[in-house]
Amino acid sequence: MSDFNQLKELEHTTYPIYEGYDLGLTYTPVGSKFKVWAPTAQQVHIALYNDAGVYDQEGNVQEHSGGQEFLMSRDDQGVWSIELEGDWNKYYYMYRLEWADNTIHYAADPYATGVSANGQRTAIIDLAQTNPDGWELDVGPTLKRPTDAILYELHVRDFSMDTHFNTGKKDLFAAQGRFEAFTYTGLKDTEGNSIGLDHLLELGITHVHLLPVADFHTVNDFAELDTEYNWGYDPQHYNVPEGSYSSNPADPETRIRELKLLVQSLHTAGIGVIMDVVYNHTYSVEQGPFEPVVPGYYYRTDEQGQLTNGSGVGNEVATERPMVRKYIKDSLRYWAEEYHIDGFRFDLMGLIDTPTVVRLTQELRSEVRSDLLIYGEPWTGGESPQPLLTLKGTQRDKGFAVFNDNYRSAIKGDSDGTGSGFATGAEHQEEQVLKGAFGAIHDFTAQPSETVNYVTAHDNLNLWDKILTVRHLREHCRFPQWEQGKPQDGRTPEQAVAEADPYWELDENNLLENETVRKSLLANGMVLTSQGIPFIHAGDELLRSKCGDHNSYRSSDVVNAIRWDNKARFRPVFDYYQGLIALRRSHPAFRMDHRELVEQHMEVLQSSGHVVAFALRHHANGDAWNHIVVIYNGSDAEQTIALPAESDRWHVVVDAHGAGNETRYEVVGHRVTVSRWSMMVLYDQEEPARVSFVTEQDQANRQAENELEDSDEGTDQEIAGTAIALTDVQLGKDSEVAPFRTIELIYERADRQYTGWNVWVWGTGHRDGHVEFRDLDDGRAVARIQVAPDIQRIGYIVRLNHWDAKDVEADRYIDIDPNQSVMQVLIHSGREEYLLLVNDNRAG
């Protein structure tokens, strides 16, 4: 049986399916309707209370009897319902379910939109009364394309728990660690630097990605603010804001209103809000939102009926089942409509079956908002029996994006150890870096809009601490060994952090010369200048350190809080990030959203010797700059790079000492020197942006593309290659007089089957990418590659169609003979080496 058929068999269970959108509470001042899907219950009552119940010392309500109870009626779809007349606003309710074995228990509504403190009882509220003034006019920023987004991952509490947040003219003590902290503007440190919301606005990011803000289990709402901390990946009530982030968790309306105020405040600043959602598991099964209502339905089990553990925390939500899939869609729709959320990041998206993710994406975009940003982690936390896991590659042309851990590892190395990547000193990472810079279109994506590029996130070592670890400086910084949020040596976290010095080697008067600073700027600079959707971990722009704690999900605020005094201390670093973000937002060449654009405009200049350099050519994506060159130097020495021959005057806008849109200085000639551990961005000339080169020819190209598609002949690369060749003619290049060398790559296969085979080349200094085998000669295929005169080596891969296969898995290279205007190179299928054929055609 195929994987798809297995999934369909799982979907067709004996459980009835309800398709309405009115599960849960429908409130009006004259009556309230309650609906719960509980097809296996024998009897269900609604129990109503005029208070939240009696709490024990752990913050739980153990007794739910004694309320007003009304028998509900069941329909043939398994839905129990009742409509009660009168105004029940501010009451609480539970469902009293009775089973075939006569057992009875009380359960909160899985569709709860309001709850008491610690989520013990479901609250009846008038949602209209929770809307801030002007809420009906609130809208988030719109995205023309997903690649326009710049994501900033932030924990609600981390944002404001630092003591330096509570400075200046306002007393913010009561707002610290809460939703409310995002509503204050005009905050500055003692040296006049903007902090808080104004810092985010000044930095220039487009969206704040909030770690989970839906109600989670692991923080007691009644606890003192500085006593309990958690990232929030322990879901309890999926449609209710977290109580510990509210100024009054005992009032069900307050947390709702305050989260809406947070959203409204960010939207007013022009910043969107991404919500981190955790539909792959629940904190508890027996005490979770599902099992008490429909036992055995919402969770995956193995052949023995045991809960599976693909999440790594003891359970997996069975997203492939119709009513589970419906629940997730209903929940997302609710957040998008009621809270004006601009997008969703899925925790362990790998565990959510691909058909569910596809349907959610399509239906939410068509029914709620067309530019909702949807992305997630394409991996699991353990083995899962689900046959259609949403892993890297499954998102191709599906409209959602996934995190690119391939690029992450290529840039920095491993996540918690001393393993290095391109930006931290590793050898032989250039080709993996190129795949990431190209938006992974030669790796696992169909379009660059499907990859979220990043180097660090809340998990694992943050960027500064990772680089210190690679450089073996943890001991010098006096970092403790952490375990479960505490130092192993018995000190308190406060003592350990006070005695650590993450910045011991820094000369704060010469920050941008420091090796760790440069490596950190290079790492995120690569993210911000690559194709795809960039993602930054909050505080990287302030050299954030967690003193070596690689898993701070339950560590104290002294470890996790963003230290706002670092802005003044490390202002040049902030300015560099701000400049890179401004550069990206100003220039669409860095934000191409279709692979055809990338194939057409992006060209590799160098990919060797700890250097990756590429050009964005011919007003890429309608950019005002003609040719843009981006260079990454991951070595400990200066590197001199050849620039494209078309121009001899270049404007440098990014180098080791600054970044932005303005010209820092000009380079005259065809070579430039890039400092160690740094990057450079240059452009040749600026003129009004243009989307196409020659309209008539563009139309002809599109007609040719349509004919290829209609006949099912050719590949995307063939179409892109055709467009590039025509563009060269349009721009007036004369290939007969241009001083290019030619490599005739002669390919021999024993089976003489050449259909679909082609060459992917880079480092030519002219036009990289797809090259066809266009001639057959004596049982061999021939591809002709043009190479700029100063190029000494090119790379190539012989591939089948659209990366369906490679002739040889390894990257291959050809050393250029400077004395040959035409080189003939013979390669045999399955062999890495090549033969240089003798040719008397000498360079003039």
Image: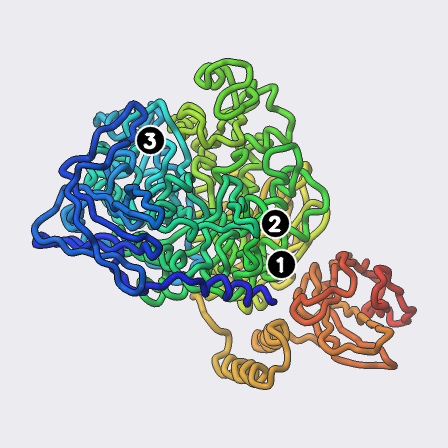
The amino acid pointed to by label 3 is Ser
From mark 1 to mark 2, how far is it between C-alphas? 9 Å
Res 223 quadrant in image: top left
Residue holding disc 3: 160
Colour setup of the view: rainbow
Which residue does the image show at 57% across and 30% down from the upper left? 514
How many residues crowd mark 1 within 10 Å: few (<14), some (14–19), many (20+)?
some
Q: In the displayed structure, would residue 139 be above or below residue 486?
A: below
Q: Measured from the top left, where is residue 568 in percent x and y?
A: 40, 28
Foreground: 538 or 379? 379
The quarter in which the C terminus is drawn is bottom right
Q: Are marks 3 and 2 in contact (CB under 8 Å)?
A: no
Residue holding disc 1: 443
The quarter in which the N terminus is drawn is bottom right
From mark 3 to mark 1, how far is it between C-alphas? 39 Å
Q: Are marks 1 and 2 in contact (CB under 8 Å)?
A: yes
- Please tell me how many numbered marks the rendered image carries: 3
The amino acid pointed to by label 1 is Asp
Which residue does the image show at 82% across and 70% down from the upper left? 822
Asked if residue 325 can be seen in this view, the reply is yes
Residue holding disc 2: 406
How many residues crowd mark 2 within 10 Å: few (<14), some (14–19), many (20+)?
many
Which residue does the image show at 46% across and 32% down from the upper left? 553
Q: Which comes before the other along the chain, label 3 or label 2?
A: 3
